[in-house]
Amino acid sequence: MSDRTRSVRKTALWKAALTYLVLGLGAVTMLVPFYWMVLTSLQPPEMAFSMGQIRWIPERIVWQNYPEAWKAIDIPRLYWNSIVVAVLGTLGQVLTSSLAAFAFARLEFPGRDRLFFAYLATMMVPGSVTMIPNFVLLRWLGWIDTYQALIIPGMFSAYGTFLLRQFFMGLPTELEDAAKIDGSSYAGIWARVTLPLSRPALATLTTFTFMGFWGAYMWPLIIIQSPELRTLPIGLASFVGRYSAEYSLWMAASVIALIPVLLLFIFNQRYFQEGIKMSGIKG
C-alpha cells in the first residue's frame, strides 16, 4: 500500500469519525430533554427538580405519579378532544393537499404554474398574521368554541401541497396513460394509481400534520372557551397553573400526551424517511 493510499484512507477515517461525533452530539442533545422529562415523571415531587440541582439517576422510582396526573386534569376528556381534532384535521389536510397537488402536477390548464407559485407564496405569511382574520371569519360563521373551528382552518396547507406535488411529478406517466386507455377518469387515476404509489409522501405529510394538530396551543387557546372542548396542550397549561411546584405530575402528564405521536412516528418511520428523501430531490 502506497503512502498516498494510506493518507487518503486516514483522511477518510478522520472525516467519518468527525461525522459520527457531530451526529452523536446532535442525537444526545435531542434526547437529553426527553430523558429528563421521563426521569422527572418517575421521581418523588420533592426530588424532581430544584434550582441548580438536577438528578440524572433516579434514587427511587414513583409510578404513582402517572395515575395521579391522569386524574388531576381529566386526561381522558383532553385525549378524546385532541384525537378528534388531530385525526380529522390530518385526514382533511391529506385529502385537500393530495387533490391540489394532483391538479398542479398532472393537469394542464392556463396559468397553472403561476397559480401554484402564488399558492406557494402563502407559506411566507406568518401564522400569527392570519389569526385575527380567521377569528373574525369563524365568528361570522358562528363557529367559535366548536370542533370545526379547531379542525377546518388547518385542513388546507401550501406545504402539504408542495410536498405531494414534488412526489407526484416523479411518478411515471406511463401508468397514468395506461389508466386513461382503460377508461379511467382523473378522479380514478388519483384514487387508484397516484395515491397507492405515494405512500411514503402521504406518511410523511400525515406525520407532520398530526404532530402539528396534536401540539397546537395558540389557536385552540384563542378559539376555545368551554372546558369540555380543551385539547391536551391547553389542559397541560392549566395543570401547570394549578400545580406549579408539582413537576413530577406535570412531566407524567406530558409523557402521557406524547405517546400517540411516538406511536405514529414508529409506525410511519420507514415511509417517513423514504418520503423525505424522494420528495425533497424531485420536481
Image (cartoon, rainbow, N blue to C red):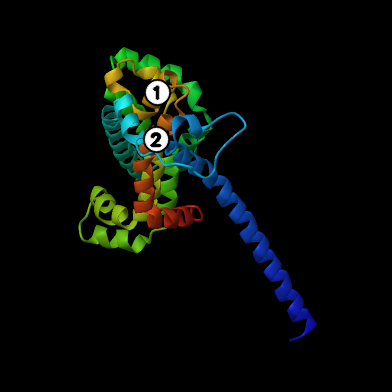
Image location (x, y in percent) of residue 151: 32, 29
Image location (x, y in percent) of residue 208: 41, 42
The image quarter in which residue 144 lies: top left
The image quarter in which residue 10 lies: bottom right
Image location (x, y in percent) of residue 279: 46, 53
Residue at 38% over, 24% down: 234
SS at mark 1? helix
Within-10-Å neighbours for mark 2: few <14, some 14–19, many 20+ = many
- Check the image and name the residue furthest to the left: 183
The image quarter in which residue 142 lies: top left
Q: Given the image, on which type of amino acid does mark 1 rest?
A: Phe
Q: How many marks?
A: 2
Q: Kindly identify which numbered label has been placed on residue 147.
A: none
Residue at 30% over, 41% down: 95
Residue at 37% over, 31% down: 154
Residue 106 visible in rendering? no
Within-10-Å neighbours for mark 1: few <14, some 14–19, many 20+ = some
Q: Given the image, on which type of amino acid does mark 2 rest?
A: Ala
Residue at 26% over, 27% down: 77
Residue 67 visible in rendering? yes
Q: Which residue is mark 1?
A: 239
Q: Which residue is mark 2?
A: 252
Image location (x, y in percent) of residue 76: 26, 31
Find the distance from the CA under tag 2 to the CA under tag 1.
11 Å
In this rendering, is residue 7 above or below 34?
below
Q: Nearer the viewer, residue 275 or 226?
A: 226
- Check the image and name the residue furthest to the bottom: 1
Dividing the image into 4 quarters, which one contains the N terminus? bottom right
Q: Earlier in the sequence, mark 2 or mark 1?
A: 1
SS at mark 2? helix
In this rendering, is residue 47 above or below 98?
above
Q: Nearer the viewer, residue 130 or 75?
A: 75
